[in-house]
Image (cartoon, rainbow, N blue to C red):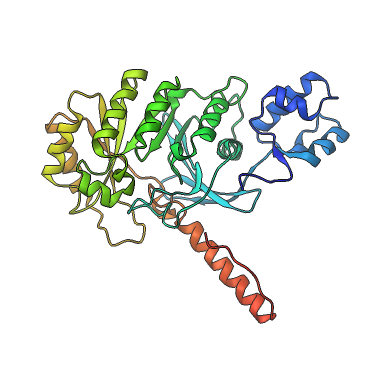
Amino acid sequence: MSENPQKISLLGLKEEEISALIPDAPRYTAKQVRAFCFSGRSIEEMTSLSKALRARLSEIAYADPVKVKRVYPSRDGSRKYLFSLTDGELIEGVFMPHDYGNTLCVSTQIGCRMHCAFCASGRDGLVRDLHFSEILGQVVAVNRAEGGTPKARAVTNIVLMGSGEPFDNYDNVMRFLEEVTAPDGLNVSERNISLSTSGLADKIRKFADSGRKVTLSISLHSPFDEERSKLMPVNRKYDVASVTDAARYYFKKTGRRVIFEYTLIKGVNDTDACAVRLKEILKGFPSHVNIIRLNDTGLEMKRPSADAAGAFMLKLNSLGVSATVRHSFGEDVEGACGQLRRRVKEEEDRKDDSTRDGEEKRGGRRKFTTV
């Protein structure tokens, strides 16, 4: 289910789409409603509209498809947001303040079908795609919660790097990008948006042809096909060569340097041979390697020390490869790369267990859906 089947989301609808819902209202009303939605207001809060019009809209639509359920503050100043959707599903995002602006990491799916070995988000597979209004709603909800407005945004940068594979939800992600960059929307520059993909080569090429020029981040994690296939099953369809070829095509079409995400795992992909191979596959290509020390997701894989990550970075630099070690935000609240959805799943399981115990004590039965 992509959204409430009885009502539709007003957030992200164009003026003509809103006008079609309220054909008897003055034309300018649709513009007002669209602006209210991007400010994060519910229909009840659109007080400049008549009470009767608000009642009519409430019968057929809602303006806030994403609500903030809980906020987890991290010691490093970041905040993980837990969102609830209209169908009761939960998703997460991470707000990361910086000197140069504030970044919000958003989810594009509930769960993920990529099943990367080190990532908690896809451990139980894909639940469903997020509607474009639900992706947009995360930005709107956090922007309001952090004291921002559409004109003076608290969220200045966006990364599509939460739960889900953005290119596995291609059409909704494209509509999200259209609305979040719209001058009468949030007007976020494409240069301030990053999209992270596990390397769906055909979609990378399609995206390159779309005219969008966001920063493209590709999860690589190993330069060797055999090892990458173990870490990322998607490599069996889109191998290292096809992914790097697609990345070159993206640069050729957009002029934007491509980022390669590289989760460093002790004893797996941190060898000199890996560094040399990275040099070979990225030679002559304007790219950058983001080294991320493996975050805890409850697996037996080992996280390298900070010194080891630094040494791997210096090895790449000495070979002529642009590389840095990325600081992971929100590790203590499980908001870092690869950790999203783990705590949500655990909380859902505890809630289900508690409800099941209550039902059994009352002699009743309840059906549960495994996520």
Residue drawn at (55%, 62%), measured in percent from left and top? 348
Quarter of the view holding residue 30: top right
Residue drawn at (79%, 19%), measured in percent from left and top? 27
Q: Is residue 331 left or right of residue 291?
A: right
Q: Position of residue 298 (x, y in %)?
A: 35, 61
Q: Position of residue 228 (x, y in %)?
A: 25, 46
Can the viewer see residue 86 in this picture? yes
Choose between 335 and 234: the one closer to the eye. 234
Quarter of the view holding residue 351: bottom right
Residue 69 vs 212, above or below: the answer is below
Choose between 55 and 329: the one closer to the eye. 55
Q: Position of residue 274 (x, y in %)?
A: 15, 42
Can the viewer see residue 81 in this picture? no
Choose between 138 and 12: the one closer to the eye. 12
Choose between 324 and 278: the one closer to the eye. 278
Residue drawn at (66%, 48%), measured in percent from left and top? 86
Q: Is residue 253 left or right of residue 143?
A: left
Q: Is residue 162 left or right of residue 71?
A: left
Residue found farthest to the right: 52
Q: Position of residue 63 (x, y in %)?
A: 70, 37
Quarter of the view holding residue 355: bottom right
